[in-house]
Amino acid sequence: MTSRTRLLAVTLFALFGASTACAQFTSIAPHFLLPANPTSADTLKLSLTDQTCGGALRYTSSPYYVRMTQNNITVTLGERTGITPLCPPPLSRDEIDLGRLPAGNYTLTVTDMRPSGPNDLFTNIPFTVTDARAIKAAPYVRLDYSGQWWDPNDSGWGLFIWQDAKSRVDSTLAAWFTYGADGKPIWYVFQPPWNTNSATMETALLRTSRPPGATVLPPGPTTSVSVGTASLDFTNTGTADVGKLTYTFTGGATVVRNIERFKP
């Protein structure tokens, strides 16, 4: 290990192992995690100084790939190809997406490729991802149901679900696009609170509309009217890919649809 690599490793160990905020290290440490103290609800990134500036060696057009074996993450940068000119400050940064990780302890290694083979810039730097659910009020939701859903028995029908895993109550918004009795497309939305960690309460089903007119800002006012109730249920499916939508239009019968996550 070169003296430069040892210096990077020591600096990053102090950074990633520290309990204080990342901001105080930005002026002395070239690389850091975003966010500094990640939770299982965060999409984690590694912020690197721009690898094509500051006299560093330029990497090829395939700048990096990330792999994980158990809890050991390795970032492999592209092959070095030559010296680049110095770049005027402030230097830009590269942000490498490490993904959303379960709570636990991890190590991080960053490697680049050289004519002689792989070269470790720093190795096995420890960091911790805390459990975001620990700060949530019960019942917290164990799986992420965000995404596009559909009923395979009714093509042209779909449901978008947004679940805010960072909120204390897993705030959820569902937008359902379907067709009315006249065959025209129609949208409904509902925002159900969670009753258990896999099923929501019944909530108002709203139909939204906006008067026709020019699309330039400001648009005409959007209005909504309650047309019934709706709820979601993923109980006993054992997966984040299968569930049920139950809805009742005012004055009508209750309908239960089996829904699946849409996978092109």
Image (tube, rainbow, N blue to C red):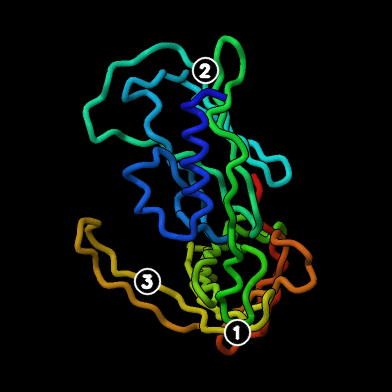
Answer few, some or many: residues within 10 Å of disc 1's Cα (few below 14, many 20 plus, some between 14 and 19).
Answer: many
How far, Cα to Cα, is label 3 from label 2? 54 Å
State the residue position of label 2.
79
Q: Residue furthest front?
A: 3
Residue 33: numbered disc = none
State the residue position of label 3.
209
Q: Earlier in the sequence, mark 3 or mark 2?
A: 2
- Residue at 52% over, 45% down: 13
State the residue position of label 1.
202
Viewer-nearest residue: 58 or 149: 58
| Placement of 242 over or under 3, stated as above or below | below
Marks 2,1: beta carbons within 8 A: no
How far, Cα to Cα, is label 2 from label 1? 55 Å
Residue 98 image point, x, y percent:
55, 44
Asked whether residue 127 is in view, the answer is: yes
Residue 73 image point, x, y percent:
63, 40
Give the amino acid type for the residue marked by disc 3 in the picture: Ser
Give the amino acid type for the residue marked by disc 2 in the picture: Glu
Answer few, some or many: residues within 10 Å of disc 2's Cα (few below 14, many 20 plus, some between 14 and 19).
Answer: many
Q: Earlier in the sequence, mark 3 or mark 1?
A: 1
- Residue at 37% over, 13% down: 83
What SS does tag 1 mark? loop
What SS does tag 2 mark? strand
| Residue depth check, mark 3 versus mark 2: number of the one nearer the observer | 2
Q: Earlier in the sequence, mark 2 or mark 1?
A: 2
Viewer-nearest residue: 52 or 189: 52
Task: Look at the image and tell me in which quarter the N terminus lies.
Answer: top right
